[in-house]
Image: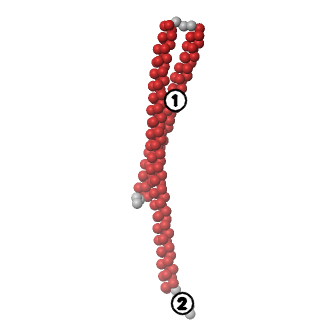
Amino acid sequence: MAAPSALDTLIDLAHRETDDAAIRLGNALRAGEEARQKLDLLQQYRDDYTDRCQASLTQGISATHFMNFQAFMQKLDCAVAGQRKVVDDTQQRIADARAAWQRCEQKKMSFVTLAERAGQAAVHRELRREQKQNDEFAARRALYKPTSS
């Protein structure tokens, strides 16, 4: 078993790794939220543009205007699809960062458990040593005690 000071060093290192992993997870979560918001904005813009075009269609529009609408809708659809891919990628990065953080946390807790066990073992050894000293002292005292008969 490692010395307590070595375990303390490992715990400190694991704690730093866990903190770094938590920061990376937080960054990934923020990036995921930003990507989701951008997707929502694009979809909302697409829906608004579709509604405006539908209103224009009921009033009648030129063929050129309709072709421009269709071309722009294709570009919007591409942008939405691209942003969905970004959202999917960020979700994967979030899952990876969360798994990394959990591994770091588990590693840290393993070191903490080892340190606790080492501490308990040291306390147990100390108690046995004290008990042995007390037993030896009592035995010597009984041996040298004058008998009163």
The residue nearer to you, when weighing 64 against 118, is: 64
From this view, report whether residue 124 is shown above or below residue 146. Answer: above
Residue 12 visible? no
In the rendered structure, find residue 138 and report the number of the disc placed on it: none
In this picture, residue 51 sits left or right of residue 87: right
Where does residue 61 sit, x and y in percent of width and height? Answer: 54, 7
Residue bearing the label numbered 2: 147
Q: Is residue 149 left or right of residue 6?
A: right
The one nearer the camera, 37 or 136, is 37
Residue drawn at (56%, 11%) of the image: 57
The structure residue drawn at horizontal position 45% and vertical position 46%, both measured from the top left corner, is 103
Q: Determine the residue positioned at 46% across, 53% down.
A: 110
User: Disc 1 marks which residue?
Assistant: 36
Residue 43 in sight: yes
Q: Position of residue 81 (x, y in %)?
A: 47, 25
Label 1: few (<14), some (14–19) or many (≥20) C-alpha neighbours in 10 Å: some
Q: Amino acid at mark 1?
A: Arg
Q: Tell us which disc is closer to us: 1 or 2.
A: 1
Instruction: Give the quadrant of the C terminus.
Output: bottom right
Looking at the picture, the colour scheme in use is secondary structure
Residues 89 and 147: in front is 89
Count numbered badges in the picture. 2
Q: Residue at x 49, y 62 (%)?
A: 120
Instruction: Identify whether 8 is placed above or below 39.
Output: below
Q: Position of residue 78 (x, y in %)?
A: 46, 21
Q: Secondary structure at mark 2?
A: loop
Q: Secondary structure at mark 1?
A: helix
Residue type, mark 2 in image: Thr
